[in-house]
Amino acid sequence: MMATTLTAQADKPFELNLWQGKPKVKSSDPNDTAKIYVYLPNKSQATRRAVVICPGGGYSHLAMDHEGKQVAEWLNQIGIAGIVLKYRMPHGKREVPISDAEEALRLVRANAAQWNINPNDVGIMGSSAGGHLASTIATHAKKGEAPNFQILFYPVITMMPDITHKGSHDNLLGADAKARYEKEYSNDLQVSRLTPRAWIALSDDDHAVLPANGVSYYQACYKHDVPASLHVYPSGGHGWGMRSSFKYHIEMLLELKAWLQSF
């Protein structure tokens, strides 16, 4: 009876402050605290795979439920640990959310044995601006913080003014961002043969984040021999996440599950 109770408690999600001491990069908002919400699958079903989840919100807020916690709950159903990252907002200081995402990957690997995770099977996922953050880590992070795979929902990819999502651009880099920073954080231009495999999903009628973002990233992966899978749904607009009202919700989950089981 006691063993059953302990197992049930272990499977409940728990919250941790991301930074145990001072953050690597100081935010301009002292009240904005980075956290992670750890969702671990039942040990009998665990694949020992984990995904760090970066919700979207234009780098101004976070859609923590349908692009965060609900994703983690679904991942648990297929035996994957979901670590939802509440990253800090940049307010024009790009290093703030980037350092949070890198620390989340490092923290997962540091706790891999305790959380029943394979440290060499830790991916990153992001939606919208969270997709930009995830793809930034996938293309920029050093070995210790680099993910093993990436999942991108209707991602912001480029920071080039004619294609980017203006709100994400301005909040991350500032409205008067220098061209060299726009290029550096246009992640389709940063893909290399070392970039981890990618699964990308978006809607053809997305008018908030132009489909060209995700398509360009797929093309860059293809050019550099990075395994990638692109899924363009006929409708749905932007921001559907795990909402069952998205017309292609079931198909999307089946395709994502099949991809995750392919490697």
Image (cartoon, rainbow, N blue to C red):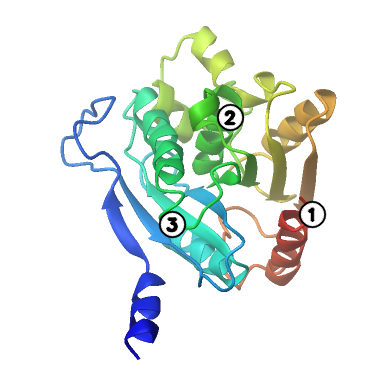
Foreground mark, 1 or 2, reads 1
Q: Is residue 241 above or below residue 231?
A: below
Q: Give residue 111's position: percent from left, percent from top.
A: 40, 48
In this view, the residue farthest toward the left is: 30
Separation of marks 3 and 1 at Cα, in angstroms: 23 Å
Q: Is residue 232 visible?
A: yes
- Say which of 202 and 108 sits in front: 108
Nearer to us in this view, 169 or 110: 110
Q: Identify the amino acid type marked 2.
A: Thr
> Sequence order check: which comes first, mark 2 or mark 3?
3
Q: From the viewer's perspective, tell me whether residue 15 is left or right of residue 82.
A: left
Quarter of the rendering containing residue 46? bottom right
Residue 37, above or below 79: above
- Image depth: mark 2 or mark 3 in front: 3
Q: Are marks 2 and 3 in contact (CB under 8 Å)?
A: no
Q: Position of residue 170 (x, y in %)?
A: 42, 27
* Three-letter code, disc 3: Trp
Residue matched to label 2: 164
Residue 37, image x, y percentages: 36, 57
Which residue is tagged 1?
262
Q: Which secondary structure lies at badge 2?
A: loop
Q: Is residue 242 visible?
A: no
Q: Quote the CA–CA distance across marks 1 and 2.
A: 32 Å
**Please, what secondary structure does the residue beneath circle 1 have?**
loop
Q: Farthest residue in the bottom direction?
A: 1
